[in-house]
Image (cartoon, rainbow, N blue to C red):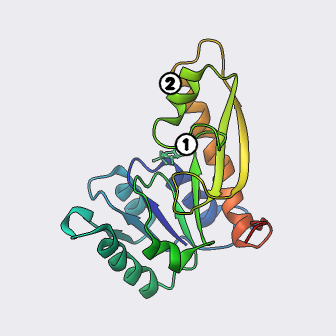
Amino acid sequence: MAVFASGTGSNFQALVDAFQAGPAQYEGDIVLLVCDKPQAYVVKRAEAAGVPVACFTPKSYLSREQYEEDVLLKLREERIDWIVLAGYMRLVTPVLLSAYGGRMLNIHPSLLPAFPGLNAVKQALDYGVCVTGVTVHLVDEGVDTGQVLAQRVVLVEKNDTEETLAARIHAAEHELYPAAVADVVAGKLSPSRL
Ligand code: GRF
């Protein structure tokens, strides 16, 4: 697997912790971090964990497609079977989708299809919902529109701020994502409409 991330990488860390040293159910290797932000903290996490890093600077390409062609070359070189997005802040184009359709997963901090896109935790609080959560889904060309594979509910508490709710959502992500990725990779959690 290659994990794609742009930020602090707490989900990357949870995935690495599970797949590098977790119980036997975590079959599969995280062999690459793809990062589009060379300064992101996730790069340090990968270095500390001994996971090779491929950093790209998308702005230096003429188009998103050209950037992804380069990423794809790297993925092929490393014989990557699965792409696991974990806070990767870019929309994926048909270049990667046609190569990895059905083999690209994402995690989103809401119960999709509610609150797709940016600031999902704030969206949920602003809307006043009592229940939100996290969703693991297949990636398609839309924004958080791919088929849902797994979800976990997180209750919104009366005095929640964006920070307190985000912290509980992150904790749920760190449990759900490695488990769901392991099940998908092992063929135990199959997308029903593929
Ligand atoms: C997570 O909330 C994830 O759901 C979203 O981006 C965030 C990444 O957080 N896609 P981190 O970088 O893994 O801490």
N-terminal of the pair, mark 2 or mark 1, is: 1
Does 126 sit left or right of 32 as displayed? right
Residue 135 is situated, as x and y percent measured from the top left of the image, at 65, 47
Question: In the figure, 87 relative to 157: above or below?
Answer: below
Q: Which image quadrant is residue 77 in?
A: bottom left
Q: Which residue is mark 2?
A: 162
Q: Which image quadrant is residue 121 in?
A: top right
Residue name at image x 64 percent, y 56 percent = 137
Residue name at image x 45 percent, y 62 percent = 4
Secondary structure at numbered mark 2: helix
Q: Amino acid at mark 1?
A: Pro
In which quadrant will I find the C terminus?
Answer: bottom right
Q: Which residue is mark 1?
A: 116
Binning the other alpha carbons within 10 Å of mark 2 as few (below 14), some (14 to 19) or many (20 upward) gives some
Residue 105 is situated, as x and y percent measured from the top left of the image, at 59, 62
Q: Which image quadrant is residue 64 in?
A: bottom left
Secondary structure at numbered mark 1: loop
Relative depth, front residue between 17 and 77:
77
Question: In the figure, 157 relative to 48: above or below?
Answer: above
Relative depth, front residue between 88 and 46:
88
Q: Are marks 2 and 1 in contact (CB under 8 Å)?
A: no
Relative depth, front residue between 6 and 49:
6
Residue name at image x 34 percent, y 72 percent = 65
Residue 138 is situated, as x and y percent measured from the top left of the image, at 63, 61
Residue 6 is situated, as x and y percent measured from the top left of the image, at 38, 54
Q: Amino acid at mark 2?
A: Glu
Question: In the figure, 134 relative to 59: above or below?
Answer: above
Q: Is mark 2 within 8 Å of ligand 1?
A: no
Q: Tell which tag, 2 or 1, sits nearer the viewer.
A: 1
Q: CA distance from mark 2 to mark 1?
A: 16 Å
